Amino acid sequence: MSEPVIHTTDVAIIGAGPTGLFAIFECGMLKMRCHVIDPLDMVGGQLSALYPEKPIYDIPGLPAIQAGDLVANLERQAAAFDPVYHLGERVEKLTPLDGGRFLLETSRGTRIDARAVIVAAGAGAFGPNRPPLDGIQQFEGESVFYMVSRREAFRDKRIVIAGGGDSAVDWALSLHELAAKIYVVHRRPKFRAAPESAERLKALSEDGTGKLELVVPYQLESLEGEGATLAAVNVKTLDGDIRRLEADVLLPFYGLATDLGPIADWGLNLDMHHITVETGTMATNIPGIFAIGDVATYDHKLKLILCGFSDAALAAHAIRPLVYPDEALHFEYSTSLGVPHA
Ligand code: FAD
């Protein structure tokens, strides 16, 4: 039997979220080739999986851009440097090799030998927090969804949104325009979302149309329906009062399960499911391994895309001397350096 192929590269990037994608560009500008691995079958991380149609307002220089469009732009920007993607594969094993290199092995048996590793794994492998309701799995994919990938699919539907954070409130505001009815179920009267969004939600619930109703303080109790088709969601107060909400769709937004999975076993210093790094280089405690974006933590860390972009630039510059130990770097702006095929 022939030996499996081992891909050799300068940098292996674990995670193709926005920061992983931008790291390809930053490494490329410093003449470093990248292989990128992600268990999702698309690039973009949370933006593609959780909110592709939502506008983002805090990307510098782009007053408003849909998450999906930002991902497409990042992919295009990275394409100049011919990255190799391994999608639908999760990095399971990371083994240090001689000469400071690393061998990565994925769930599909792909093997990558890299001089440096950038961990851009966000919250780790994706998994929604599923509410503990009997039989919920029978409705998933047809009437119960943990993310909205296409708003239009919810036109004229009666929707129950459960949760009190940003996702629940933002989707209630967004889907309100096209749904037949929206119930927002939360166990407390106060929402944890951005104050401005929470106020808009309250205003809509009081606009006299009855189209958006706040069902508080209630918790999900049980589901009714035939096969995968939902008929109603029953909700309950702590005192045991039950309400029956007739509905076509349930969207539970109880956050993502943050499971770093195999990454937690590689000997990296962790702080509450995040990898601690040195600011300025994004170096972890293992020489040659760097962490950027949501997965990385340091004092005053902000989990924002723009901070992940900056992390990527810092990591790429810290990695360059490992790949080119005998070449001094003369810093140049992209305006002077240019980009291939641009
Ligand atoms: P992620 O986007 O989480 O991507 C990480 C990738 O790593 C994933 O694709 C995952 O599958 C992959 N991965 C995990 N484990 C492995 C493994 N073992 N092997 C291979 N791959 C792995 N931020 C803003 O700046 N502005 C906003 O307006 C904004 N709005 C948001 C709205 C919502 C509803 C949500 C949920 C988030 C929002 N954010 C916003 C936050 C933003 O999405 C994150 O900060 C950003 O996605 C972090 O990017 P990342 O690349 O670090 O991680």
Image: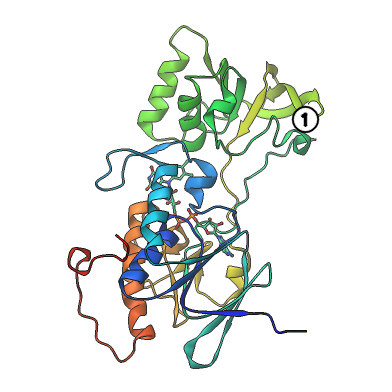
What percent of the width, then of the height, locates residue 92?
A: 64, 70
What percent of the width, then of the height, locates residue 286?
A: 47, 81
What percent of the width, then of the height, locates residue 86?
A: 57, 64
Q: Is residue 256 above or below residue 272?
A: above
Crowd rating for badge 1 (residues with CA inside 10 Å; few <14, some 14–19, many 20+): some
Kindly give the residue lying farthest to the front in the view shown.
Answer: 341
Kindly give the residue lying farthest to the left in the view shown.
Answer: 336
Residue 50 seen in the current view: yes
Q: Residue at x 32, y 39 (%)?
A: 57
Q: Which residue is mark 1?
A: 228
Kindly give the residue lying farthest to the top in the view shown.
Answer: 208
What percent of the width, then of the height, locates residue 206?
A: 44, 12
Task: Identify which residue, 134 or 18, lies in the foreground.
Answer: 18
Q: Is residue 55 above or below residue 331?
A: above
Quarter holding the C terminus is bottom left
SS state under label 1? loop
Q: Residue at x 48, y 41 (%)?
A: 52
Q: In the figure, is residue 188 to the left or right of 262?
A: left
Q: Residue at x 40, y 43 (%)?
A: 69
- Type of the residue with mark 1: Ala
